Amino acid sequence: MTEEDLKETITKLKIDFLQKRIMALQDQIEIYRCWVRDLHKFLGIEGNEPKLMEEDDEK
């Protein structure tokens, strides 16, 4: 294994780790959004569901 192969392998491992971390964070964000939505329903303020930044950018 050459030094270039080693660097490429390390880069792939870093990318894989970051992709998995991003997916885990997205799942966590979705859980919090659902929790906030349910809390708003419980409190009777359903119309104030939080929006993601992506949704705001589309407007």
Image (cartoon, rainbow, N blue to C red):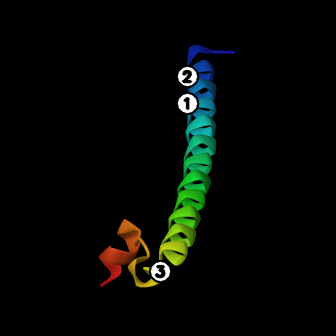
Location of mark 1 (residue): 11
Q: Nearer the viewer, residue 52 or 34?
A: 34
Assess whether mark 1 and mark 2 are in contact (beta carbons under 8 angstroms): yes
Which comes sooner in the sequence, label 1 or label 3? 1
How far apart are the alpha carbons under marks 2 and 1? 6 Å
Spot occupied by residue 2 in the image (x, y as percentages of width and height) = 63, 15
Which comes sooner in the sequence, label 3 or label 2? 2
Characterize the local packing of mark 2: few (<14), some (14-19) or many (20 or more) Cα atoms within 10 angstroms.
few
Location of mark 2 (residue): 7
The quadrant where residue 45 appears: bottom left
How far apart are the alpha carbons under marks 3 and 2? 55 Å
Q: Is residue 4 above or below residue 12?
A: above
Characterize the local packing of mark 3: few (<14), some (14-19) or many (20 or more) Cα atoms within 10 angstroms.
few
- In the displayed structure image, the side of residue 9 where residue 41 appears, left or right: left
Q: Is residue 15 above or below residue 59?
A: above
Residue drawn at 69 percent across, 15 percent down? 1
How far apart are the alpha carbons under marks 1 and 3? 49 Å
Q: Nearer the viewer, residue 49 or 30?
A: 49
Residue drawn at 55 percent across, 30 percent down? 11
The amino acid sitting under disc 1 is Thr
Location of mark 3 (residue): 44
* Secondary structure under the numbered disc 2 in the rendered image: helix
The amino acid sitting under disc 2 is Lys
- In the displayed structure image, the side of residue 32 where residue 9 appears, left or right: right
Spot occupied by residue 52 in the image (x, y as percentages of width and height) = 41, 68
* Secondary structure under the numbered disc 3 in the rendered image: loop
The amino acid sitting under disc 3 is Gly
Labels 1, 3: front one:
3
Q: Is residue 38 above or below residue 24?
A: below
